Amino acid sequence: MNALLVVDVQNDFCPGGALAVPDGDRVVPVINRLIEHFEVVLNTQDWHPDGHHSFASSHEGKKPFDVIQVDYGDQVLWPDHCVQGSKGAAFHPDLNINASQLVLRKGFRKSIDSYSAFFENDQSTPTGLGEYLRERGITTLYVTGLAADFCVKWTVLDAIKEGFRVNVVEDAVRGIDLDGSLEQARQEMSGAGARETSSETLLHRV
Ligand code: VGL
Ligand code: ZN
């Protein structure tokens, strides 16, 4: 069984937001079209408490996009974003979430970031998504959303590790692109076994 996974299509990742992904909002109409063709639609939502450890503002003398070392390796420091209950954390107003069957929130532990929808950044604390998908008999994911080089990438890599078949819908993702991270993400995802597809291919198939 297939599922459409919509990663972090939230105001803060769209133009005008705190951690805007260039053209991030352009994925919205594409995803809205795809939604109609999937029986299972699942969303993730980046959902940080105030003062989250991934925020540059939580570290004296640091600025956004600096990188620090933490227990689990490198941590990019971000502008404050997706604070629980804020407008920035809300889904993009045009994103159709009516048909969503799950909103999986992540990044809610103050001292650990969570890019992947499967594991937090220590790569060992599960979010529960793997078991959820297995229990529902879902074997194949079509991944969309933001940001292609962070939360989408880590979600895709973990999904493959967890044994799911993964397709990235290339026109339904956009990246932040820090120092070439977007091209690197593409290579890592395809190197790990993710397939690239497009909404056009999918919409013509069904
Ligand atoms: C994301 C950076 C920080 C993402 C979330 O959704 O890709 N990136 N938090
Ligand atoms: Zn975040």
Image: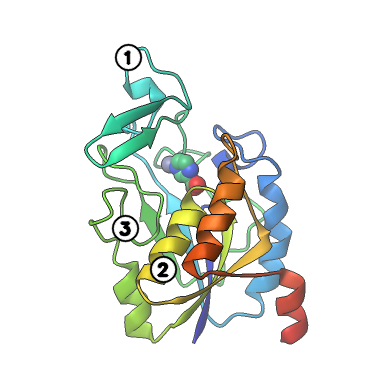
Q: How many angstroms separate mark 3 from mark 1 (CA)?
A: 28 Å
Q: Is residue 135 left or right of residue 32?
A: left
Number of numbered markers: 3
The residue where tag 2 is placed is 159
Q: Quadrant of the C terminus?
A: bottom right
The residue where tag 3 is placed is 119
Reply above or below: 187 against 182.
below
Task: Say whether disc 2 or disc 3 marks the residue closer to the N-terminus.
Answer: 3
Residue 11, percent across and down?
Answer: 58, 43
Q: How many angstroms separate mark 2 from mark 1 (CA)?
A: 35 Å
Q: Are marks 2 and 3 in contact (CB under 8 Å)?
A: no
Q: Quadrant of residue 33?
A: bottom right
Which amino acid, mark 3? Phe
Which amino acid, mark 1? Glu
Mark 3, Cα crowd under 10 Å, few <14 / some 14-19 / many 20+, is many
Mark 2, Cα crowd under 10 Å, few <14 / some 14-19 / many 20+, is many
